Image (cartoon, coloured by chain):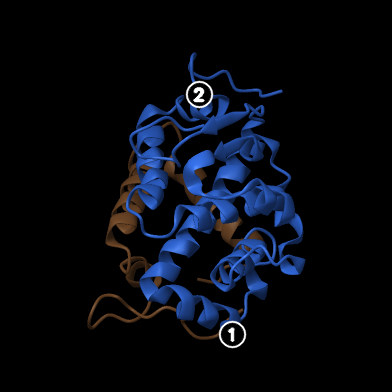
Chain colours: A brown, B blue
C-alpha cells in the first residue's frame, strides 16, 4: 500500500484526501455524493446498522483511511 | 436462483435495484455518467468491466455486452490472459493492471503502476478510471449478493444514465 497520496488535491489550499481526489471529476463526484448522501439520509435501514457495516467493510478491506 | 423478487419487466439486476427506486435512480445516474460524458474510451471501460467480471466469476455481469463499445470478439476471448496477448495497447494494459488488482489485490497496486496510469490518462483520467473500476467491482458484488440470474443482452450502446440497467 502506498504511504503517500497518489492523487493530488483538485481543490486549491486543501490537502489531498478522498474528497479532493474525487474533485478531479466533478460530475462523477456529484453523482457519487447524491447516491451516498441519499443512502445515509433516507431508506429502510437505521444509521447504526449502516455504520456498523461501513466500519466492518473498512476492516475487511484493511482500509485505514 | 435469486432470492429477490424485483420489479416486473426489467432485467434481473435492474429489477432488484428497483426495490429501492430512489437509490436505483441515483445509482444509474452515477454509473451512467461514467459512460455518458466520454471521460474515457468506451472500449477501455468495457475491457475493464469484463475483466473485473471474470475475476469475480460473475456470470450475470459477463452476460452483458456493450456491442458498440468497440471491443472485438478476439479481445474478449484473449482477456483472461491479457498479459500474454498482443491484442491490447499499452494504454489498455495499464488500465487492465488496475482492473486486475482492484477486486482482490487492491493493496498490491504499486506506486509505479499508478504513476504509469497517470502517464497514460492524466490525473483526472486516472481518477475517472479508478472510480469506474470500483463501480464494476461493486456491480459484481451486488449481482452476486443478490443472486442475480444471468440475462444475456447485447445492449448496442454502453450504459447510460438515461436507460435501463442490464
Mark 1 chain? B
The residue sitting at 51% across, 54% down in the picture is: B43
Left or right: A1 in relation to A43 = right
As rendered, which of A18 and B92 lies closer to the eye?
B92
Asked which quadrant contains residue A27, the reply is bottom left
SS for dot 2: helix
Task: State the SS at label 1.
Answer: helix
Residue B8 picture location, percent across and down: 49, 13
Q: Is residue B119 above or below residue B143?
A: below
> Which residue occupies the foreground of this view, B160 or B43?
B43
Residue at screen point 47% across, 33% down: B165
Position of residue B139 relative to residue B152, above or below, is: below
Q: Quadrant of the N terminus of chain B?
A: top right
Q: Which of the numbered marks, if any, corresponds to residue B79?
A: none
- Percent of width and height locating residue B100: 66, 63
Residue at the spot of label 2: B15
* Viewer-proximal residue among A32 and B42: B42
Q: Position of residue A28 (x, y in %)?
A: 34, 56
Residues marked 1 and 2 touching at CB (< 8 Å):
no
Q: Which of the 4 quarters of the picture holds residue B104? A: bottom right
Disc 1 target residue: B112
Residue B138 vs B110, above or below: the answer is above
Q: Position of residue B121 (x, y in %)?
A: 44, 72
Which residue appears at 47% of the width and 76% of the height?
Answer: B120
Residue B32 lies, with reference to residue B152, above or below; the image says below
**Mark 1 closeness class: few <14, some 14–19, many ≥20 residues within 10 Å:** few
CA separation in Å, label 1 and label 2: 41 Å
How many marks do you count on the picture?
2
Which residue is at a point 33% across and 71% down the rendered structure image? A20
Q: Earlier in the sequence, mark 1 or mark 2?
A: 2
Callout 2: chain = B
Local crowd size for mark 2, using a 10 Å CA cut-off: few (<14), some (14–19), many (≥20): many
Amino acid at each position: 500500500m502506498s504511504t503517500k497520496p497518489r492523487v493530488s488535491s483538485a481543490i486549491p489550499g486543501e490537502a489531498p484526501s478522498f474528497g479532493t481526489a474525487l474533485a478531479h471529476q466533478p460530475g462523477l463526484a456529484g453523482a457519487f455524493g447524491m447516491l451516498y448522501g441519499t443512502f445515509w439520509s433516507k431508506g429502510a435501514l437505521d444509521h447504526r446498522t449502516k455504520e456498523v457495516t461501513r466500519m466492518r467493510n473498512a476492516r475487511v478491506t484493511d482500509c485505514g483511511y | 436462483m435469486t432470492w429477490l423478487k424485483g420489479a416486473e419487466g426489467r432485467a434481473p439486476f435492474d429489477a432488484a435495484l428497483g426495490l429501492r427506486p430512489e437509490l436505483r435512480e441515483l445509482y444509474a445516474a452515477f454509473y451512467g455518467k461514467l459512460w455518458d460524458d466520454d471521460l474515457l474510451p468506451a472500449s477501455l471501460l468495457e475491457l475493464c468491466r469484463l475483466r473485473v467480471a471474470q475475476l469475480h466469476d460473475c456470470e450475470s455481469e459477463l452476460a452483458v455486452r456493450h456491442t458498440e463499445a468497440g471491443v472485438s470478439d478476439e479481445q474478449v476471448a484473449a482477456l483472461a490472459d491479457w498479459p500474454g496477448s498482443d491484442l491490447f495497447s499499452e494504454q489498455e494494459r495499464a488500465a487492465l493492471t488496475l482492473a486486475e488488482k482492484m477486486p482482490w489485490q487492491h493493496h498490491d497496486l504499486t506506486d509505479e503502476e499508478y504513476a504509469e496510469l497517470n502517464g497514460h490518462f492524466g490525473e483526472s483520467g486516472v481518477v475517472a478510471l479508478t472510480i469506474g473500476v470500483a463501480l464494476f467491482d461493486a456491480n459484481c458484488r451486488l449481482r452476486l449478493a443478490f443472486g442475480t440470474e444471468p440475462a444475456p443482452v447485447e445492449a448496442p450502446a454502453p450504459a447510460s444514465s438515461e436507460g435501463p440497467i442490464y
